[in-house]
Each structure stands twice: as C-alpha cells, then as structure tokens.
Image (tube, rainbow, N blue to C red):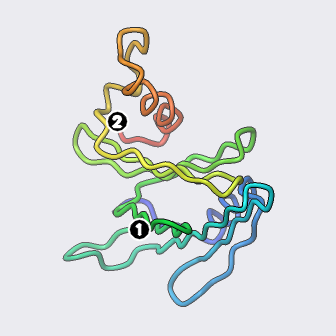
C-alpha cells in the first residue's frame, strides 16, 4: 500500500467539510450536520489497518439511513469550492469513489470504468455521465 493517511491529511479533509476531526481508537472521526435539511452524517477514516490478508485504508460513512464503506482507499481530492471530499479506490481499470459533502450528504460510485472519467461525455447516456463527471476530479490522484 502506497498511501497512508497522516494527521495533516485529516485536517485537509475536515476543512472543506466545515468540521473538526477527533481521534477515536485507531480511527479519525468527523461529524457533519446540516440543520436546515435535518441531516447528520459521521465519517471514520482508518489508516493502514488489516483488511483481510492485506493492509489498507478504510473509509466508513454513517448516515441516518445507511452505512457506506470504501475499502483500500488509495487517495482523496479536496474541493473547497464545492465543499466536498472525494475518497477514491482503484483496481485495474476500475475506480470507486465516495464523495462526502459539507451539507451532510454523500454519494458512492462503484466499479466505474476508468475510461469513463476522461471519455467524451456527449457520447454517454446521462446515467453514465454523472459518475464520470463526479469522479473526473480524481484523475490527478490515480496511478498511471
């Protein structure tokens, strides 16, 4: 595993989400609230933990209605202007992304063909374009 979350990464992640992070056991935990929309989510970032037979990063998001996990997170992209952080995991030819927003919402895109990220969006159906646009910001942190 090449990427390991450091405390400096955690602070960079917390800033656009308008929250603070606190260490809880072997995880960093953040709570994000949007009172107007009556939403609240929490994020846990586990760095370099055993996942099966390998070591990796694990991102967990808990909402009022669901629990999402991204295993083997290989990087992240912060967008201060959008108020969001995109966590990314790669496997050969595929990308998964977990997007967490300062408005206490999140989106998960799984097993997206990497070619979709830089493809011609005008040639794709709208149901495919959404994942391509959402994850296109991650291209700068993806391996070659």
Q: Quadrant of the C terminus?
A: top left
In depth, the one of 83 and 48 nearer the eye is 83
Residue 18 badge: none
- Label 2–label 1 contact, CB within 8 A: no
Say which element carries label 1.
strand
Measuring from the top left, give residue 97's x and y in whole percent. 43, 47
Please report whichever mark, 2 or 1, sits nearer to the chain's N-terminal start. 1
Residue 144 badge: 2
Per the image, the residue denoted by label 1 is 57
Quarter of image, res 20: bottom right
Measuring from the top left, give residue 51's x and y in whole percent. 28, 75
Q: What is the number of callouts on the image?
A: 2
Nearer the observer: mark 2 or 1; the answer is 1
Quarter of image, res 95: top left
* Residue at (50, 85) in percent of width and height: 26
- What separation in Å lies between label 2 and label 1 (alpha carbons)? 20 Å
Q: Quadrant of the N terminus?
A: bottom left
Quarter of image, res 41: bottom right
* Residue at (35, 16) in percent of width and height: 124
In depth, the one of 26 and 83 nearer the eye is 83
> Viewed as shown, does residue 53 lie left or right of 95?
left
In depth, the one of 35 and 3 nearer the eye is 35
Say which element carries label 2.
loop
> Viewed as shown, does residue 112 lie left or right of 142?
left
Neighbourhood count class around disc 2 (C-alpha, 10 Å): few under 14, some 14–19, many 20 upward: few
């Amino acid at each position: 595993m090449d990427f390991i979350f450091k405390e400096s990464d955690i602070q960079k992640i917390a800033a656009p989400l308008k929250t603070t992070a606190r260490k809880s056991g072997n995880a960093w935990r953040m709570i994000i609230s949007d009172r107007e929309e009556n939403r609240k989510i929490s994020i846990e970032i586990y760095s370099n933990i055993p996942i099966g037979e390998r070591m990796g990063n694990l991102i967990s998001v808990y909402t009022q209605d669901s629990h999402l996990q991204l295993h083997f997170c290989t990087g992240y992209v912060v967008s201060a202007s959008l108020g969001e952080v995109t966590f990314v995991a790669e496997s050969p030819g595929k990308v998964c992304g977990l997007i967490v927003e300062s408005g206490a919402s999140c989106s998960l895109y799984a097993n997206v063909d990497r070619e979709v990220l830089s493809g011609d969006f005008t040639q794709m159906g709208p149901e495919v374009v959404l994942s391509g646009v959402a994850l296109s910001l991650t291209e700068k942190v993806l391996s070659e």
